[in-house]
Structures are given as structure tokens and as C-alpha cells.
Image: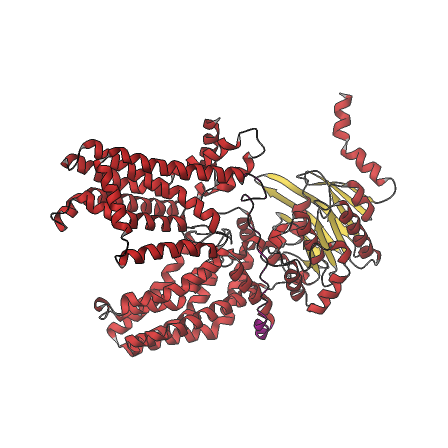
Amino acid sequence: MFKRLFSLEWKSFFRSASLGKSIGLKILMGFLALYFIVAFLMFGIGLYPLIIKYFPGEEPLYLVNRFILVWLVLELAYRFLLQNLPILDIKPLMLLPIKKRKVVNVVLLKSLYSFFNFLPLLIIIPFGIYNIYKQTFSTGAIIAWMIAMIGLTLSVNYANFIIKKNFTDNIKALIPVVVGIVVIASLDYLKIFESIVWFGKGLNAILEFPILALISILIVAIFYKWNQKDLESKFYLDASLKDEIKAANTNEFLWTKRFGDIAPYLQLDLKMIWRNKRPKTTVYISILFLAYGLIFYGNDTYQELPAFFVFVGIFITGIFMINFGQFIPAWDAGYYPLIMAQNIPLKKYLTAKAGLITFSVVVLAILSTPYLYYGWKIFLINIICAIYNIGVNIPILLYAGSFNRKKIDLDKSPFMNYQGMGATQWIVGLPLLLMPLFIFWIINKFISFETAVSVLLGLGIIGLILRNRAISFIAQRYNRQKYAMIEGFKQSGE
Amino acid sequence: MITATNLTKVYNGTKVLNIGHLDIPTGQSLGLVGNNGAGKTTFFSMLLDLIQPTTGNIFNHEITVSQNEEWKEFTSSFIDESFLIGYLTPEEYFYFIGDLRKQNKADVDALLLTFEDFFHDEILGKRKYLRDLSKGNQKKVGIVAALIGSPKVIILDEPFANLDPTTQIRLKKIIKDLTAQKETTILISSHDLIHITEVCERIVVLDKGDLVKDLMTSTATLDELETYFSKDLTLKEEV
């Protein structure tokens, strides 16, 4: 029975629509995975010699043990953000004559095959082997240590599910956990109670009494049981298997009325953004990226290369434009037939989208004004980039949108989410980011900074003047592509 | 007046729709029946220009639907949940459709008032998004939204499916009231022969894309349809 359930999992993986992802994307994901594997492995192998080199006189294992607690907390944090227990997979199995316990065990054991559990092994095992090779402690002690470490990693794996299940729906409930961590951290910092050191000492004790490794296995078992009990008690459609229904937010965005006949579309877009996870997170990311400039503006390496600041400027003022615009009209994929069959002239639809993005560029440009601190040139470049974004890049993005054929699930998180991605998203990046950079670089190099800035400004203004005509042209293209788009958006994407 | 001429749709060499000629006069209520795969939804999708015909054309009040968008101003439809916007509340959805059909809030409210019975107090004022409503309630919202702004042509794909018995009866009354004035052309598809013969004055039967029967509804129609759809069964029994 167990075998059959696992073969189901296997099929669901290989027959899923996502396996048909574009080749380019798969290669990229492959490279990312490879990168992490190599990075962790190098770290695992290099850890022992590095410690010997930079911390002479320290016992490497003791030193490492002192940082384990910090590492575990960090691991919990990134697992919390990225890892999910695939609990909804249980649903189709509920009606079948399979014992609850078995299904729950499959879900829980399946989580062991996660990439997140694999990565720490790449550090623990090479480092352990190095220690055995150097005979720092007895072989048995080191193996016990490795077992304890793997146990701790898996404890984090299962602890994360418990935390996620009880807290994700209610972010406020997370406050005690965060406060707890902060309190422990500050007690440690103030040297009142050094939990990090004590945790390290506990791990050191394993090297003396290998039998203590059993404690870590016991912790895994406890968390596993806890998860098991929790899942079994929620093995009902109305409990955790059902998505939470939240009371509707009824902000009407009535202020959009002043924009006349595109107001209904603007309202719809704003509601779409505020009420769905993926577009909403896109907004938060845009605000975070405002800080992008800090990396470059203060850095002397880039001072000789003002063209690079154009890149940064386009990025800072246009990050929402890029993140949101590249998936137009896939955001509306779920109801694209409605948009096509209702009395919605495409030109108005697109004008509303352009209006929304323009608004975002203006807001981000205003928010970026503190960069005046780094000199008026940077400030000027940012403003010019904003105008260029509005005039030139918005029509380019809208045009590129007509190549979109992939649906977007509004409720999924955008982290590590490549749904809706296709060749379009990669190709459009070139004219979007590199063209202004190139124009500026060439003119700045051979004529002057002032001319280069003026040319970008001129292009932006020309774009603004021609916007109406450009949108008419783009609307025609959307009309021609309409059937293919409706067909594409119907497929459950990924 | 809706006219389809020489209309075909071919997918990978298979003809899924083949209608030589079909006239639907203004004010008529037409019922489309046929087993799964008969081409009902395909026909409606072409009428709404969501699918491109392989050959032929559809004219909606003299407008070629695939070439001119003006038919959208007087045509409304509810085909499936892709005509709903999941993250809106029912009220917001109605007002949005109202905006598109040049109806202000008061107009929409007045219309919604007449559907109080139909909603059975499960739709309005619930502070729920459409995506969180049950399938039946979603359908109610879609159907009523298709009636906003007194469209000249209304297209409903399987409106009776997923509705509870009370709502089915109310929907029949709504459709009958609409057709009584002979101003609105209504196109409905259904698998329920009793409902459809009750509300439609004309029944068209499709079979694997072909138009096989075109009947003006009379007392004999239901029997005729039942005989037609059980013919495979009787054939087998004879063998």
C-alpha cells in the first residue's frame, strides 16, 4: 500500500503540467540547484581547513557547535518562507479505503525528500568525514555527532510544519515566537544567558558521550508524532484541508473615479493587486528594491561609470513596472474570456494598465528622491529614468504582453514561482534595461553627460506624446492574438 | 437576428461543429441540446468571438462578430466561471459589469432588488469573495450579471446545472418573463430536456457538431426529444 501511494506521488510529479515548463527555465532552475549544491559542498569540504587557518588553536568541531543554534534559527526562517507541507494532496485520498495514519505518514515522509533537507547534508557529511580523517575525536563520537546534526535538521523540518500550520493564517500569532527568539538572542548578546554557548556545550557533550545523540533523534520523533497527531485530527474537509475564507475587504478605491472612463478598470486592477497574494507581494518587493541604489551609489567602483546609474535608475523607478507589467494580461487570465466577451474596448483596458504603471513609476520616483544625498547627478538620472520608463518602457512592456500565453495563479507566492514565465519575459528585459543604458553610455562617452540625459528625456517625452497611438497599435495586436491568448490562459499554467 | 452561415470548426482534423445555416430571429428563445461533445459550448464561444471559426461567419444583428466588436454593447453571456472575477464580492462584480454596460449603481441596485427571491439571501451583503461562494451561488451571480443593462442578446451555457430545485424553478420564471416581451433573444443550452422545453420556444439538437433537429416547441417536443436521445439504447435492445 505504501509503495502504491509513493508511486502515485511519482506519477503526479512526472505527469504534472509543470514538467512541460519551457526548457530555458528548467536549465535555469537546474543551474540554481547546481549552484547551491556546489556552494554547500565546497563549504562542507573547506570548513575544517578554513577553521584551522583562520582560528588557529580552536578545535574546529567545538567552534562549529557554537554556531549551530544560530544556523538552526536561520534554517527555520528560510524554511518558513519557502517550504510547504503539501497537505492538499491528501484530499483525493480521503474517500479511498486507506488508513488515515498511512496517508499522513506518506505526506510526512515525503517531506524528507526536500531539497532543504539535502543541502545541510552536504555540509555535515564532508565536515564529519574530514574530522574522522583527522581523528580529532573517536570515529564513533563523530558519527554520533553527524547523526545528532541530521536529527536537528530534520527537527527543524518538522517544527516548521507545526509553526506554519498554526501561524500562517494568523500572522499575529507569530509575534510570541519572534519575541521569544529576540529575547533569547538579546539575553545572549548581553551575556546574561548565553544560550548559543550552552547549546554548543550540549553538542560538545555528544562527542564525549555519543549516546546523547539519541536525544536529537528523540526530538525528531516528538515533532514527527506531533505532526502526525495534528494532521490526523485535521483529516476533515472543513478543517485544514480547506482554504481559509477571509472576510472580504471592501475598499472601493472610489478616488479612481476622477480618471473618467478608465476608472472601473483601475478599480479592478487595484482590487486585484490588494486582494491577491502574488500581485500584493510584487508591491512589497518594489518598495524593498528602492534600497537597491544603496549598493551602488556609495561604491567607488561605479563612480566612473554613470551609465550604470541609468540601469539602477530604470530599475528603481521601474521595478513595479517590470514585475507587474511583464505579466500583463496574464494577471487577468482567470477571467480573460469575460474581458473579451464583455463590453470592454481593448484600448481602454490597456490605457488603464498603462495608467496604473505610470502611477507606480511616479510614486517610486518620488520615494527615491532621498538619493539626492549622493549628488544631483544621481537624482537627475533617476528622474529622467522615470520619464523614460513612462514614455518608452511602458509601451514596450504592453506590446510584449501580447506574447503572453501563460496563466498566473493570483494566490500563489511569487518567491521561486516561475508560473507565467516564458521566453517573452527574458527577451523583453533586453530593450527594457539595456537600451537606455546603451544610449546613455554612447552619448555620454562621445558627447557629454548633459546631452545624454537630454536624449533620454527627449525619448521619454516623445513616447508620452505618441502613447495614445502606440496603445491603439498594441490593442490591434492584442486583438489579433486574442484566440491564442484565450486558449493559452485556459490551460492550468505553471 | 442572429445568423450563422456555413459555420465549421475543425480541431486536428476532427470536425467539432458544422452548421450549414441557422437563423435566430430577434426575440426568440432558443434551446440548444445535445450530448457531451455535441458542440454547444463551441457554438456559444464562436458567437462570442472567443474561438475563431474554421470556415463561415456568425452575424449578430448584421455585425460580423469576428470583425467588429460593436455586438458587445448589446450582447451578454455567462458561459462558465471564467466569466466571474474571483476576488470581487458579488456586489462589486455587479457594479463592475454595470459600469461596462453603462448602468450606474442605482440602476444595478434596482435590478438586483428584483432578484431578491432568486438570490435567496445567500449572495448580497455576505462580505464574501466570489471565489469563496459555492458553485451554485457563483452561477446565480453569473446569470444575474448577464441580465444587467437590458441586453438584446443573452447567452447562457447550462444555466440550470448546479442550481438547487427552488432556484431552477425561479430561473425558469425569470427566463419566461424575459422572453414574454419578445425583445430579447435568449440562447440557452441544457442537458435537462424538461426545463429546456418548458422555457424555449425553439429547440435545436446538435450531435457531434451536426445540426440534427430543429423544432418549434409544442406539447409533443419533449416526447420527441426523449425518443431521440434514447435511440441508442433502443437499438441495442433490439439487437
Residue A308 in percent (x, y) is at: 28, 67
Report the residue at 76% width, 56% height from top: B1
Report the residue at 46% width, 33% height from top: A105
Q: Nearer the viewer, residue A214 or A410?
A: A214
Q: Is residue A109 above or below residue A274?
A: above
Left or right: A293 in relation to B169: left
Q: Is residue B50 visible?
A: no
Q: Is residue A227 above or below residue A415?
A: above
| Count of numbered labels shown in the rendering | 0
Residue A271 in percent (x, y) is at: 55, 62
Using the rendered view, name the quadrant where residue A378 is placed: bottom left
How did the renderer colour the structure?
A: secondary structure
Q: Which residues are magenta?
A: A235-260
Left or right: B209 in relation to A442: right
Residue A158 in percent (x, y) is at: 40, 41
Q: Nearer the viewer, residue A396 or A79?
A: A79
Q: Does the magenta segment cover residue B162?
A: no
Q: Nearer the viewer, residue B134 or A69?
A: A69
Name the residue furthest front: A192
Report the magenta stretch's main SS.
Answer: loop
Name the residue furthest top: B239
